[in-house]
Amino acid sequence: MKKNHWITFIVGIAITLGIYAVPAVAQPAAPAQQPAPAQNLVAVIDVAQVIKQHPEFMTQQEALAQQLKQAEATFQKRQETIAAKQKALEASPHKAGSQEYQRQFDEIASDLADFEKDAKVQQRKFALANSQIMYNTYQDIKATIEKFAMAKGIMQVTDYREFEPNPADPQTVAEDMDQRLVWFNKNLNITRHIIGEIYAARGQQPPQTAPAGNAGAAPRQATAPPAPAAPAGMQQPLR
């Protein structure tokens, strides 16, 4: 990531209001002068960086990560329990087709089906939780940008990722070339100002430096451990 530029963003809008006085007698009245239009000021912001440093985003992501860790531990234990039952069945003296073998076989199949069903439910739960965090964060950022832009007379704000492409890494070169904004004056960058506004609204001090890496990257989706393999000759239950 490029070093963030700490700048003072100063904008002014000169608007002339009213009508000039009528000249002396015997001269035609001068046409009324129209108010000067507001400047079409524009600004640039790295939204991903703002998301990454948003105080509520960081807190909620940490909480979600802890929940994910606990869920993974639970599913790991369930996986080990099913695997142990499968191993015991394979080592049991009961022959395939016997009543006891079939009972244990059906119990493992039921456990396996429940495991996979619950894993999918958890995956969706964490995906939705992550989506809600991202949504709330982005809405707050947009509202902050709007308030700041309206106060400063800014007519448009463009998103731009600040990072240093590496020719040895084709992916970074491609990402840089994919950006719609090719160049901008660094004085137009309001990233640090918006971060400051977000923290000021909460009575907090913003972080002094931007985090390294790809700012604003979404947390990984919740994934349960893979279902254990069925014992020899055992088919996955139909769903």
Image: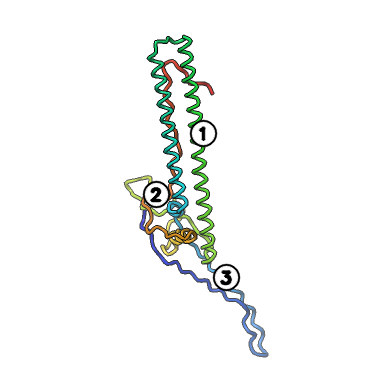
Q: Which residue is mark 3?
A: 37
**Residue position for label 1:** 121
Choose the circle earlier in sequence order: 3 or 1.
3
Find residue 34 and report its horizontal and vertical position in percent. 61, 74
Quadrant into which the C terminus falls = top right
Task: Note whether 129 is above or below 21 in the view shown.
Answer: above
User: Residue 218 is drawn in which quadrant?
Assistant: top left
- Inter-mark Cα distance, 2 to 1: 29 Å
Relative to the observer, which residue lies in front, 110 or 20? 110
Kind of residue at badge 1: Val
Does the CB distance between marks 2 and 1 fall below 8 Å?
A: no
- Tell us which disc is closer to us: 3 or 1: 1
What amino acid does circle 3 point to? Pro
Query: Which of these two is toward me, 23 or 105?
Result: 105
Picture residue at 42% right of the left edge, 35% below the top: 72
**Local SS, label 1:** helix
Q: How many other residues sit within 10 Å of disc 3, few (<14), some (14-19) or many (≥20)?
A: few
Under mark 2, the amino acid is: Asn
Query: Which residue in the protein does label 2 denote?
Result: 214
Q: Is residue 108 above or below residue 100?
A: below
Residue ranking furthest to the bottom: 25
Q: Name the mark nearer the viewer: 2 or 3.
A: 2
The 10 Å Cα crowd at callout 1, few under 14, some 14 to 19, many 20 or more, is: few
Along the line of sight, the residue nearer the viewer: 8 or 115: 115
Mark 2 to mark 3 CA distance (whole Å): 39 Å
- Compare residues 115 and 221 and report the one nearer the observer: 115
Under circle 3, the secondary element is: loop
- Provide residue 127's location: percent of width, then percent of height: 49, 40
Residue 31 at x, y percent in the picture: 64, 79
